[in-house]
Every structure is written in C-alpha cells, then in structure tokens.
Amino acid sequence: MKAWCVERITEAGEMQFRDLPDPVPGLGQYVVRVEAAGVNFLDTLIIRGRYQKKPPLPFTPGAEVAGTILAAGEGAPLAPGTRVLAAVETGGYAEAALVAQAATFELPDWMPAAEALALLGVNYPTSYYALHHRAALRAGETVLVHAGAGGVGSAAVQLAKAAGARVIATAGSVEKLDVCRRLGADAVVSYGETDWVDAVRRLTDGRGADVIYDPVGGEVGEQSLRALAWMGRYLVVGFAAGGISKLPANRLLLSNGAALGVFWGEVVNRDPATAASVRAALTALYREGRIPPLIGGRYRLAEAPAALAALAGRATVGKLVLEP
C-alpha cells in the first residue's frame, strides 16, 4: 500500500511517500480501507516532534480515518465490508490503516465518508464535548469562539448556535470573518482590532463572554481571561498559535471563573459511553440539517504535504480531508 512515512524528526516536518507492507490485523483489530483521512493541527506538530505524544520512528501520521473494513482480527465483532470511522494513534495517511476495535464504530450507510469524518472524527465531538459536558452551556449565554472559521472553531460556532447561545467569533481575515457569519455567528471580531478584548466587551455591554472556546492559546489565551464574564468558563482546547498560554490566575479569581481542559482523544479512551452519546447527539443534529459539516478542502493522499502546509499556514477553513 501507499503511505506517508516520517523517518526522522525535522523542523520542516519531512515525510516520504512509500510503498509499505499491507497491515495484518491482530487480536481485536481491523484493517480499514481508507476512504477519507482527517488532517488535523496535531498532525503538523507530531511530524515535527512537538506534540505531547511522540511515536517511535518511523511512523505514518494521521489520527482519524473513515472507510470500509477489509479484514478483522480474532475477537473483533464487525465483519469485512462494514463502513466505520476509527481513531488511531498513527497510521491514517495511508491507503489502509490498522485500527483497534475499541476505537472503531460503525457508520450509517447514508453518511458520506468525508462528512462522517468531519462530523464524528475529532472536530465536532471535541466542540460538543467542550460546550455541553465541560462548560455546561445554557441557552441564552454568550460564547466567544476563537478561530471561528477553523476546524474545531467552525464546529463550535454551529453547535453553540444550535444550543441557543449568542455567538461571537474571532478570525484573522475578512474572508474568514465572512465564513463565521455564514456559519451563524451573531457578531465577529478581527484579531486586527487594536484591542479585540475591548471589542468583545463592547458587544457584551461590558459583561464579557460566559464561555470562551480557545483552540489558539498563546497570547490570545492569556488575553481571553480579560473578556470572561462573571462565573465564566474558559475552555482550553488547543495551542494553534504555537505557545502554551500562561493564564493569569488573578483574572479567574476576579471573575469567579474556571479554566477547563478539553481532550477528546482521552475521552474516547477512558469513557466510551460518553463518546458514544456525543456521536449520537451529533448524528441527530446532522440528520435534522442543523449542523452541515464545513469541509474546507479535499486533497488526494499524495497531496498530504500541501494539506499540512495550508493548515499550518492558517490558510484554510473548516475540515481538511485526504481521499486516497
């Protein structure tokens, strides 16, 4: 099979497109023919050795796949021919992937692979879990979504609106601000504002946001606590800016607020019942037409470096997928 392979860690994130042996399923494993593989910001980090988890070399990047089971190992209950979505530690950027039974679930026949990946892979479950399970979002509250045109950000805008919240979205360009509006944001703020925190406070009559959804981190995260309302919840979703936020704890004290971590991958591992309930809720919203997934780019498998470069350069919106 064809697959991308990281053979050494470099600042440039070098990968080689190789012919690798077809995977063979072991106990409780499947081999899945990849019909769509997700391109996530963590992929841009892991190939440079900057992610929290560092797989042994060589490895194939890619943390989520949608496709059809080709072979099942002993004890794996789903039959070959079943359409599935699976989370993987590594291995998604390939024509076939080895996946664990525990991280695999069946897809409905009516859901296209790329949309299934966008909806049920990482982005929408992360945002749903963050807003509903961590922040306990209530209708009528104000949600500030950073990077509202990005992968998890666009999902958060749609899901917060579906929950009856007022949404303020931030973005770095006119084009991305327009995307946020189309997704349903009630107001948008450019990072180019002289002080975007003041802009948010003006839009909330000085209260600030009840919930702040932050996949950006760095200085954006540090400044966000200035825009947090009384009893507000600040969600730590990621660090796309490249730096881990040094949160001013005094701001949390003054707002009687809370900073809450969000790590969807570990929810899948530690609490499969909650993961299943999140996916069921998302599937229902999708069938009702309330959250059409935003797929911002479709690339061939051989174009994976271009997809990663576009994502790392913040030139994309929504979800990027590879389609072998």
Image: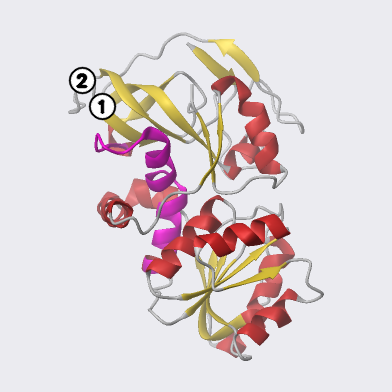
Q: Residue at x 46, y 34 (%)?
A: 89
- The numbered mark, 1 or 2, whose residue comes first in the sequence reads 1
Magenta range: 104-132
On screen, residue 103 versus residue 232, left or right, reads left
Residue at (44% x, 30% y) in the render:
36
Q: Nearer the viewer, residue 304 or 240?
A: 304
Position above or below: 179 against 22: below
Residue pointed to by mark 2: 74
Give the overall secondary structure of the magenta segment: helix
Residue shown at the point (64%, 55%) measured from the top left? 239
Quadrant of residue 129 in the image?
Answer: bottom left
Mark 1: few, some, or many residues within 10 Å (few <14, many ≥20)? some
Residue 78: x, y in percent? 20, 28
Q: Amino acid at mark 2?
A: Glu
Q: Residue furthest right?
A: 194
Marks 1/2 in contact by CB < 8 Å: the verdict is yes
User: Picture coordinates of residue 306 (x, y %)?
Assistant: 67, 30
The amino acid pointed to by label 1 is Gly
Camera-nearest residue between 315 and 216: 315
- Above or below, 119 against 186 in this view is above
Q: Is residue 186 left or right of residue 268?
A: right
- Provide the secondary structure element on which disc 2 rests: loop
Please say whether residue 211 is one of the residues in the magenta stretch: no
- Give the distance between the C-alpha atoms of the residues marked 1 and 2, in whole angstroms: 6 Å
Q: Disc 1 designates what residue?
A: 28
Q: Is residue 235 left or right of residue 241?
A: left
**Please, is residue 308 above or below residue 295 in the view?**
above
Question: What is the x, y in percent for residue 119?
Answer: 40, 47
